[in-house]
Image (cartoon, helix red, strand yellow):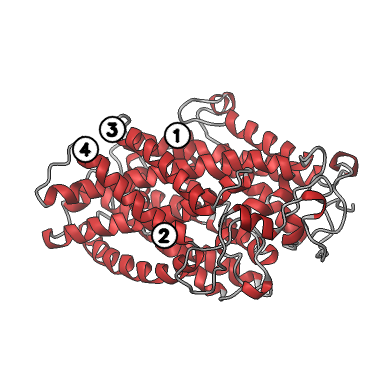
Amino acid sequence: MASTLPDPVPRSQSAARDGGSAPDEVHEANGVDEVSRPGGGRIEAHGIDHIPDAERHGRARELFPVWAAANVNYLSLVIGGALILMGLTLWQALAVLAVGNLFWTLTGLLAVSGPAAGAPSEVITRALYGVIGNRVNNAIVGWLISVCYFALNLSAAAVAAFSLVEKVGITADTGVKVVVIVVIAALTLTISVYGHAVIVRLYPLITLALGAAFVVVAVYVVRHADFSYAPAHRLTGIDLWATALAGVTLVASGPLSYTTSADFSRYLPRATPKRAVVGWTALGGFLPSMVVCSLGALAATTVDMTDPQSALESILPAWFTPVFLLALVLGTIAINALTAYSAGLALQAVGLRIRRSVSVLFDGTAAVALTLYALLVSNFLDTVNNVLQLTVVLLGPSTAIYATDIVLRRARYDGQALADETRSSPFWYRGGINPAGACALLTGSTAAALCVNTLYTGPLATTLGGLDLTLPVGMILASACYALVSRMPRLQGTGNRRGDG
């Protein structure tokens, strides 16, 4: 059966026809006059506009340290320890970590659309949801969830920084905590504002520094770990499966949150091998996440990881504690710089014609406010677990739809056509909305919400005795629905003209 997806043949004419947003117009909207050059130290000029082939540079292997630096962080330790606290044995927890981290393969798959289109994920997803529908997608999946993750990670960094402040003799009262949070956010946003070139140059150094620090952590954790650990009351039957699935969902929420992985691969040359993009992205996420999460699980076999930072400090030498705390802060800055970068692009893609640097600062302000709430009002560990598990209701289906579209189009996208937001755009579909994407996201998210067993217990989870099938049900139904409706010409609308890519 023939697909009705736009044909992947690049268009040579300007995307600004009939009043659309051409790359130059978006550049002007971003308020930047200079051009960002490979490896330059200036603020990145490009926002959501198309990256010309002449400005593409680098190799796929540069993606490894970008993702590695972002995954050597405090939140990974928290997640690893949480699996033991949930009642799993050590080896069950490690198996759950392996399965959950395999979702980094999907992050790698989504990244191949970046070099193909020369555009960020926030623009490429116009092919999935339509010009108008994608604005809604970016507002919720792209911006809101990114800001929530920013706040969670910032909270984790702040907890470590509070302890560091106390060690130098300063009482971490409310005023000091606010200052610490703002300083960490400012350092993070500085990297995000300078953008892609600075990230690519800086993150290999961060990866080396964090790697060295966590080698020391690993030595002491492994030395104290109880490899035969098992909880006093072992989980069996449906309880074991329910806990294991909840654990996989918790771990997978990390890679699934990066539906924006094309943001960091879009500067690569169009001819960059797809396998290399998938491999280096997935490996950069999988290896450090698996190692650091495993350290959290190993530590939980011998210390109480309800307070991960204090627990780890109890088994680390006193001289290394300040280094460890600094590493936790640095790792969180690395992951949040990527998150804020993508959130800034999402805000532009919603339709706000502002500079990327301004949109990033707006994201930071919102995240700081959420962080203050998470640390000063709510329970941090409960907040982490609940938010990470609930976000997959949207993130699972949206990732599945994106991956399905890449497979259906064979990763061929025309970035200039995607920049066209007019009614004549090949991605206008019906009233600016792609019925396939809208139907698939609604179907997948609704089904996933019925399977939730976190903050509430959905009817399907109740029927299954507490078994939380949020992740597989949401992703499978969303993918199947998108593939099916995409092949129904009458539903796609007259605006879906062939000739985009």
**Type of residue at label 1?**
Asp
Q: Is residue 308 visible?
A: no
- Residue under pointer 1: 239
Of marks 4 and 3, the one in the foreground: 4
Q: Which residue is mark 3?
A: 376
Which-is-in-front pick, marks 2 and 3? 2
Residue 352 left/right relative to 1: left
CA gap, disc 2 to disc 3? 27 Å
The answer to whether the residues at label 2 and label 3 have Cβ atoms under 8 Å apart is no
Residue found 25% across the figure and 44% down from its top: 179
Q: Position of residue 202 (x, y in %)?
A: 40, 69
- Residue at 87% in and 55% down: 498
Q: Is residue 94 left or right of residue 223?
A: right
Which one is earlier in the sequence, the residue at label 2 or at label 3? 2
Q: Position of residue 426 (x, y in %)?
A: 82, 51
Q: Nearer the viewer, residue 468 or 214?
A: 214
Q: Label 2 near label 1: C-beta < 8 Å? A: no
Q: Specify the amino acid type for callout 4.
A: Gly
Please tell me the numbered disc located at residue 175. Answer: 4
| Image mark count | 4
